[in-house]
């Protein structure tokens, strides 16, 4: 069901929100809304062949919508159109834990491609499926299940499962090659973190933030720091706030995937990672945690991770005393708050929390991809982003170009 709504003076079509399987009544309400037409009330929606059902789920059963597993297939297919594979695996585990699935192996077989797409892209088809099943096994533990209990292929779940194997000499060679290409700001950031890892003294910071606008080389800093640590035979964890960003980092994973951050957050939320889980062992062994696109993450997620690392390490220092490097640009995308005001959005940033005082900020300012002729424009954009151009400003002459658009009858204006 859709309805016209006015927003900002324009006519728009309102979309139906996605509902979790765990919110059963709303989930089945949504299922009915997608299949029944012309209803005028909730009771009308629950009335099947003249009989009023007590719940939306019962109405779905009477209509035959819950016969077999087709509704679970539909749920995964719909989610795959708009969600990342890491979320799909969480959804699959929820369906196994809460749903009445007749044939879980068939559900896996038909959707394994979308469930493992990120791992397949990063490794290979066979290895990617292995990693997807391994993560599903960890997720199923939250519901008292495992791969064997749901008749899915078992995998070797040693604690090194999510620990990538790196050739130390190759990683060190990669780091040395990258170090030669660093500019002064990037070099300072890399050596500052390495110094904290290997030459730590009590007065040093353990939490760092790499602040840099787009194209200043943040990813290149990560791609130098990570192999520098791995080249010494140590573990370095690369994570990102989004599934797209984590593909840019060697061995990268999403923050929700490795920390098991809950989807619904509040100020007291805790991560769903058990102390004996594979990821917990890796987190404890890691010399550094690199977190890209951190400004997009809600402060409640950082607080949950802070609690998790403190619990795992039995240490009350920020983030359990781990060396952690966050990176990103607060001038770009902040945490997305549903119908949130500007003040609410800003207050959801880690920069507005007491945790921020524990971070040492390192800045990147040089646009590494801009030609000399465009550096002035890049500098002007940075001043605008910093709010240093005043309330009123005009576009500088070097940013103005005239384009002649040829007439074409096929163009729609």
Image (cartoon, grey):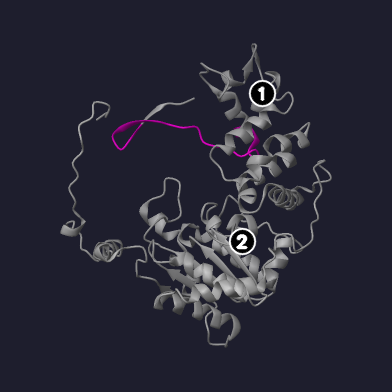
Q: Give the numbered dot on residue 251.
A: 2
Q: Quadrant of residue 181?
A: bottom left
Compared to residue 122, the image places residue 41 above or below, namely: above
Residue identifier under label 1: 60
Q: Give the percent coordinates (x, y) of residue 179.
A: 49, 76
Q: Can the viewer see residue 219?
A: yes
Task: Tell me the residue at 60%/27% (across/down).
Answer: 31
Q: Is residue 142 left or right of residue 121?
A: right
Q: Give the percent coordinates (x, y) of residue 262.
A: 61, 53
Mark 1 surroundings within 10 Å by alpha-carbon count, few (fewer than 14), some (14 through 19), many (20 or more): many
Highlighted range, magenta? 6-26
Q: Quadrant of residue 164?
A: bottom right
Q: Can the viewer see residue 393?
A: no
Q: Is residue 316 left or right of residue 380?
A: right
Q: Where does the C terminus fall, quadrant-wise?
A: top left
Compared to residue 311, the image places residue 300 above or below, namely: above
Magenta stretch holds residue 367: no
Q: Nearer the viewer, residue 299 or 104?
A: 104
Q: Give the numbered dot on residue 85.
A: none
Quick one: SS at disc 2?
loop
Compared to residue 329, the image places residue 41 above or below, namely: above
Q: Give the percent coordinates (x, y) of residue 341.
A: 38, 51
């Amino acid at each position: 069901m859709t309805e016209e709504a006015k927003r900002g003076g324009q006519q728009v079509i309102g979309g139906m929100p996605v509902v979790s399987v765990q919110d059963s009544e709303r989930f089945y309400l949504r299922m009915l809304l997608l299949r029944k037409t012309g209803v005028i009330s909730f009771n009308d929606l629950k009335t099947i062949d003249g009989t009023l059902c007590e719940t939306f789920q019962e109405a779905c059963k009477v209509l035959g919508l819950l016969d077999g597993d087709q509704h679970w297939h539909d749920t995964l297919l719909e989610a795959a159109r708009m969600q990342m594979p890491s979320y799909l695996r969480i959804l699959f585990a929820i369906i196994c834990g809460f749903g009445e699935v007749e044939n879980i192996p068939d559900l896996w077989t038909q959707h394994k491609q979308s469930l493992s797409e990120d791992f397949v892209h990063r490794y290979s088809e066979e290895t990617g499926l292995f990693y997807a099943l391994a993560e599903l096994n960890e997720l199923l533990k939250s519901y008292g299940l495992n791969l064997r209990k749901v008749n899915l292929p078992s995998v070797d779940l040693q604690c090194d499962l999510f620990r990538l194997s790196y050739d130390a000499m190759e990683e060190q060679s990669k780091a040395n090659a990258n170090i030669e290409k660093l500019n002064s700001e990037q070099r300072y950031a890399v050596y500052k973190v390495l110094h904290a890892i290997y030459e730590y003294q009590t007065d040093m910071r353990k939490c760092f933030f790499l602040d840099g606008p787009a194209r200043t080389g943040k990813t290149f800093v990560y791609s130098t720091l990570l192999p520098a640590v791995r080249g010494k035979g140590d573990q370095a964890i690369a994570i990102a706030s989004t599934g797209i960003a984590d593909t840019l980092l060697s061995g990268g994973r999403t923050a929700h995937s490795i920390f098991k951050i809950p989807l619904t957050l509040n100020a007291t939320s805790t991560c769903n990672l058990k102390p004996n889980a594979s990821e917990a062992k890796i987190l404890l062994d890691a010399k550094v945690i690199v977190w890209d696109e951190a400004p997009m993450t809600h402060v409640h997620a950082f607080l949950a991770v802070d609690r998790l690392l403190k619990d795992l390490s039995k240490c009350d220092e920020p983030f359990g005393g781990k060396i952690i490097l966050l990176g990103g640009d607060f001038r770009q995308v902040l945490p997305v708050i549903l119908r949130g005001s500007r003040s609410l959005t800003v207050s959801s940033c880690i920069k507005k929390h007491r945790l921020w005082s524990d971070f040492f900020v390192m800045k990147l300012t040089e646009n590494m991809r801009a030609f000399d002729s465009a550096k002035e424009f890049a500098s002007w954009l940075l001043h605008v982003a910093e709010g240093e151009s005043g309330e009123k400003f005009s576009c500088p002459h070097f940013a103005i170009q005239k384009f002649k658009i040829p007439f074409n009858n096929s163009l729609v204006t």
